[in-house]
Image (spheres, coloured by chain):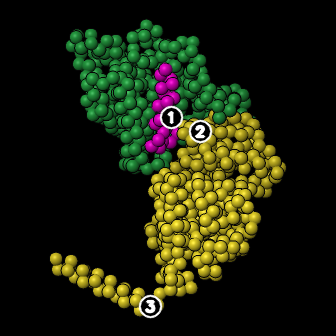
Amino acid sequence: MEKISLLGQLTQYFFTGVTVGSIYALVAVGFNIIYNVTEIINFAQGEFVMLGGLVMVFLAAAANLPLPLAFVLTVAAVTGVGALMERFTINPLKNATVLTMIIVTIAVSIVLKGIAMFVWGKDPYIIPPFSGSKPIFILGAAIQTQTLWVLLITAVVVVLLSLFFKKTRYGKAMLACADDPEAARLVGIRVNSMILISFALSAAIGAVAGAIITPISLMEYDRGALLALKGFGAAVMGGLGSFYGAVVAGIFLGIIESFCAGFISSGYKDAVALLILLLVLYVRPSGLFGNVEASKIKEF
Amino acid sequence: MKVKGRSIWIALALTLSLVLVFSCAKEKEPYKVGAVFSVTGRASFLGEPEKKTAEMIAEALNNAGGINGHRLELVLYDDESDETKCVLAVKRLIKKDNVPVIIGPSLSGNTMAVVKVANDEQIPLVSCAASNKIVTPVVERKWIFKVPQSDTHAVEKIYDYLLKNGMTKIAIMSVSTGFGASGREELLRIAPEVGIEILADERYGPKDTDITAQLTRIRGTGAQAIVNWSVGPTQVLAVKNWRDLGMTSIPFFQSHGFGSHKNIELAGGAAEGVLCPLGKVNIPLLVVDNDPQKKVIMLYNESYEQKYNEPISSFGGHAWDSLNLVIDAMRSVGPDPAKIRDYIENRKNFIGQHGVFNFSPTDHNGLTKEAFEMVVVKDNTWALAR
């Protein structure tokens, strides 16, 4: 096999980075939705991704459903898990501090991981790519078709979400809760329902991320924690609460990691990603796209 | 009720006849063998088949008259994959159960934790864990043996194959866990000795979701082959990425950790052409008829599958090797710890599941790279690589 050209390598690293970065971005967006409404950092966000992947495997491979149907059912099922989580663990805590609730989400993540281990065991699982496994060659770099699906679906999710928050009543109501829950309650917004919706929505986005990445990277019961960590990094780098910040920072982190693995050393890629995160926070404590004023009134 | 009443009678009659049989036969004192396996916990995939194998062997042996007329009594404890519990179990075996010899533990870490105990108490221990550190240096490990092959053997086997096929410039990849790090060390150490040049040394984390960047980098170096050292999801991921990137013209070698059919299934066709060294016990049908191991391997595979209705695993083979080695020793020298130790240390040509063992005072593993067979994935199953 002939050596790959530098341009080919660059293209390869870029696409790899964007793919992984899209997943970080989706996780970060999930963090932001809940954070915006409740100020809670939901540490079970990675578990939603893991569940999305494993439920998808179960429906598509074991139950043999057609992919689009399996995809829709997966998202629905994990959305249900997110809603149940809010109803049974967050909602009953009437006067708890944000910190208590964050610890509760850690507990939920451990429980979800344990349940997944019992149901699916410790082995990794995989589903076939959505449309064939023949890669497309661009400038000598091999791009998997699933990569294109990941990019497309991430883009669709981001567009739908911004429409939701800008154009619909529920979306606007959720943003209102984010600005000031007391005032929102005064104008007749049911803050309680908004919190429920925020968990359901984050779970749905996590499920989408899990379902689309599983054909590329496999999925097993304890994958969630690392994805949550990377996604959290992206959310902080982009500025907690900022959607576009999360998307840009997520993809940026992915690309940095990929180029670092390619040009410096794969051993350092996590370290470099975190170093850049620290640098960004040092220069701009509120994140790349964070609102300095808004971050002052938040607890975290 | 009637049926129940009858079954009680049958049970009673059976018990009575058993008592009669036992009191009639002049029973010789049983020979004890201690065993510690990680039957539950994170390493249950090791301990479970080991326990089943040991119990199967003991049962068959006792049905056939035991060791020179002495029944074999297997005293088996589960260390729950935990080092502390492993130490307690070994101490209990030695102090309370007074066993003359111990097989197990399943894990390298657990074995390292009990090496000193067994050595100090002068009870021979035949470990089912792979790390080379268990039996080196031999001077400090006088009472310790191990039956699994070492990383070194797997690396030597792969390098042999590479050289035979005229490949001297390679790239290596490894996962950043104990298994990957130890394999990487051996790959780097042995390469210059045999004249192999390592052009790239890539690493990745055990939870990485994508290894295409590392592979792309390797593609830029002009390596003639890739050797990957990992277990778990990343070893399947590496194969998938290798295929997705269209790099199949660069042969892909995996460690002996790839030796499970499950990995071929997970890779979903992507593993076609992947090479790896494998213990012969995993490939009973591929072992040639005149191979000295053929008979024991076929027998073990058939009886295990018949008894437990599941395929054997590589790990059960380690329990087979350790227990039969101990039985072999007891048959010759009886239940005396020092004599068992000396016997095993000088045992030559012991035909086991994972190789033909030749122990010596300087080698308490007794295997060479010949314990491995190079296999290639062909039509979604293993075939011999030539």
- The magenta segment is A216-236
Amino acid of disc 1 = Leu
The residue at which mark 3 appears reads as B25
Inter-mark Cα distance, 1 to 2: 11 Å
Q: Secondary structure of the magenta portion, mostly?
A: helix
From the viewer's perspective, tell me whether residue B280 is left or right of residue A227.
right
Q: Residue at x 26, y 19 (%)?
A: A191
Q: Position of residue B349 (x, y in %)?
A: 70, 74
Q: Residue at x 44, y 91 (%)?
A: B25
User: Is residue A219 covered in magenta?
Assistant: yes
**Relative height, residue B271 to residue B209 (above, below):** below
The residue at which mark 1 appears reads as A226
Residues B190 and B169: in front is B190
The colour with which the image depicts chain A is: green
From the viewer's perspective, tell me whether residue A52 is left or right of residue B179.
left
In this rendering, which labeled residue sits more in front, label 2 or label 3?
3
